[in-house]
Image (cartoon, coloured by chain):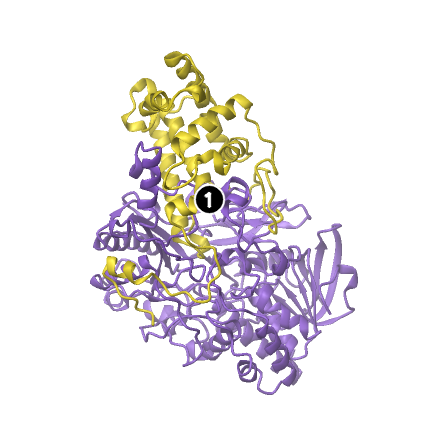
Amino acid sequence: METPEKFPRISRRVLLKWFATATTAMTMGDMASISFGFTPTPGKEVPKGYGQDPDLSQYYNPGDFWPLTLTPEQRKTVTALADLILPEDHLGPAASAVRVPDFIDEWVSAPYPDQMDDAKVVIPGLKWLEDESKKRFKKDFSSLNEKQKRAICDDICWPPDAKPEFKQAANFFSRFRNIAVGAYYGTPEGWKAIGYEGNVPLMSFDGPPQEVLDKLGVTQTVK
Amino acid sequence: MPIITSDQVQPEYDVAIVGSGAGGGQMAYTLTQAGFKCVMLESGRSYNPDTETAMFQRNDQGPLGSVSTPEKMFGFWDATVNGGWSVPGEPYTQASNKEEEQFWWWRARMMGGRTNHWGRISLRNGEYDFKPYSRDGLGFDWPIGYKDVKDYYTKVEMLIGVYGTNEGLENTPDSPKGVLLPAPKGRAAELYSQKHGKKLGIPIIPIHRAVLTKTLDADNIPKKLHPKNKRAQKILAEAMRGRAACFWATPCGRGCNIRANYQSTTVHLPPALATGNLDIIPDAHVREVLIGKDGKATGVLFINKKNRSEGRVKAKIVVLAASSGETVRIMLNTKNAQSPNGLANSSGLVGKYIMDTVGASVGGHVPALENLPPHNEDGAGGSHFYAPWWLYKEQHAGKLNFARGYHIEMGGSRGMPGGRNPVPSDFVKGAYGTKFKEEARRYYGSFVGYSCRGEMIPNEGSFAEIDPTVKDDYGVPVLRWHWKWSDHELNMAVHAAQTFSALIEAMGGTVRSKKVKTGHDIIEPGGKIIHEVGGALMGADPKKSVCNKWNQTWDVKNLFLCDGTPFPSNADKNPTLTIMALAWRAADHIIEEARKGNI
């Protein structure tokens, strides 16, 4: 890959994202305590993307704010890998059925530092995956059967366990998985898969159901 | 009278109000109900929460899964317009290159300012909070006490609607019976924290937030708030009937188009406009206060951001409520023969002693919360529980190495996913395929986090001044920031980290944040909590303060500062409710003094 990154650096960065996720989930409403995956530069001009005053009264699709840049070949690889990570099963549809590849294209084409940093790993990573696929099986990644796909991905799915020659590819896999699952769980199908039941208006908020209280050994203290 | 452009300005007003947020909104509300003709200037654009609020948009319906970006720091659907720690065309500078000496200044260039996205946490300062110097010899006492503000807290709570409970805890004032709206039920992680907090002596109780958990009593509250003013009663009753109760969905930070939570644009400004006594000029970037020969304020000078022309409004009284940083900037940019160092600055203290809140967070994973049966925990769009500061006695006995308190904010809900990986990679390791999906479902909702919101003591090293060379795109000289934490804040952050770790462990969980050796490892940058107050402190001595106890500047009798600027201390209680209470109190004073012919 052209953009070598040592694992420890990734590790810190991934760590930041864990915090971002955990803290975002925990602080709905308290706007001050969110962590970011990037370092803000207070008082300085920020990169231009959708601007600081986008129209919030509507919905958007990938490609609405900046052009999508993946080639059709890259999209094929993206789709195959995303569907391997998030297949159709008892928990819901496959990634490609809920437009995860579009989202990944939007992400790696975005003008912000965090996403540009990911693109520097993901784009060469896609190429590595194709090269490796041809090397091992003489086929495009998307044409491999599941067993063949897994043979490659098992070597790169977790950076700490990856052999030295697979470290960079493993960094790619980690980032790709983060982006793909971030997209997947933002959809109604993803909500169902993970067990999120909100975003619907209710007449009253009754707190957790009794079986949850029982499981935790707590009682509702607000009457 | 309505939202106008700068060429529609009336020849003269009773009061010019700079800023449309919590302080400006309250000031406009109270004064216009009393018949004062007011003009409000807002540096940002006009904003209509009825049509512009993203209420049910999912994360997959915004770009990048709606994650935060440098242009929308709190995510795509956050209410903030043209705002953040960077604002287009409006830079600020830092005196130091060291990160820990820099201040992050958050602004929102929109009608209603930061009230459109704030956390709605509405806590009263207690008796101790007005007399900190008397208790520990640090910082400054306020020239007023809790008894002077108590009734105004009540009035504001009745006007905006605040949920919570009365718990009778030390320095954590109760509201009069019937004022608070019902507290929402505890969520799973909140109840679990509460149970285990008890073991550590941490009192986890319902928080107070400005969200309507039921509709306001429009038949009775207006009569109580405006006993002798039938017209105000009618206007307010109508405004209250236009606000729905929370329907338990969508985060408050997006704003609320059913008006269930407080934001200036849905609660203060509509009834103020309904009086016919208020003109609002958006895109009016105030550069300086106009001063007459007698040294009194005669109005303000602003740049019309649409065409960069200068405009003026004339007024008998000027109220600055533009945020600590912006109010200080306007005062220091107002220079003339009588006040070469800036307006109302004979003390030399304008810009000094700016404070933020001490922020520090620790996250953890709690196995007991794994695999819970799915259920809806959106709730009131923000926290339901918190822990007020609980170690007053230990602190007073000298057992702690910091002088002031912090409260604990907490979370751990099954919030709306999307955008980021919902599970930390070290939990799922190399999982992919159905295995990953099963792991995601198992761990979702099992992560908790606790945040310290603590009192910063004002110090000589934290202040703002005018940068000698840099101007914004409108030609207005910008602020240069200085920042310093003292050991009190740094030690508090360490204490908070240790407390949160102990709490997570008491819940059978594991701490997921790095180990903390010094406060610098964990304390958030100055300004990141967005509780900036101070810069023109109120006091009893004109030589040692900028304002008197009525938010009125000593030097310029018809100039009032009604944002956080006059705060002599920044209790852990989150400043917004106090800003509103003091603004209402100052407005009553203005009404009274004007009647007597003193202003």
Q: Is residue A67 left or right of residue B163?
A: right
Q: For residue A63, which quarter of the picture?
A: top right
Q: For residue B166, which quarter of the picture?
A: bottom left
Give amino acid for label 1: Gly
Hue used for the chain lettered B: purple
- Which chain does the residue under circle 1 lie in? A
- Residue under numbered circle 1: A186
Q: Is residue A119 above or below residue B207?
A: above
Residue at image point 23% right, 64% down: B198
| Kind of element beneath mark 1 | loop
The chain letter of the yellow chain reads A
Which of the pair B112/B233 is nearer the observer? B233
Q: For residue A21, which quarter of the picture?
A: top left
Q: In this view, does B537 lie above or below A103?
A: below
Q: In this view, does B187 lie to the left or right of B58?
A: left
Which of the pair B475/B210 is nearer the observer? B210
Which part of the image, by quadrant, shows the C terminus of chain A? bottom left
Residue at image point 44% right, 26% down: A80
Residue at image point 24% right, 65% down: B394
Q: In this view, does B95 lie to the left or right of B165?
A: right
Position of residue B251 measured from the top left corner of the image (x, y, whole percent) = 48, 56
Q: How many labels does the image show?
A: 1
Q: Is residue B148 left or right of residue B486?
A: right
Q: How crowded is mark 1: few (under 14 residues within 10 Å), some or many (20 or more)?
A: many
Position of residue B475 measured from the top left corner of the image (x, y, whole percent) = 68, 48
Position of residue B578 measured from the top left corner of the image (x, y, whole percent) = 48, 69
Note whether residue A114 is visible: no
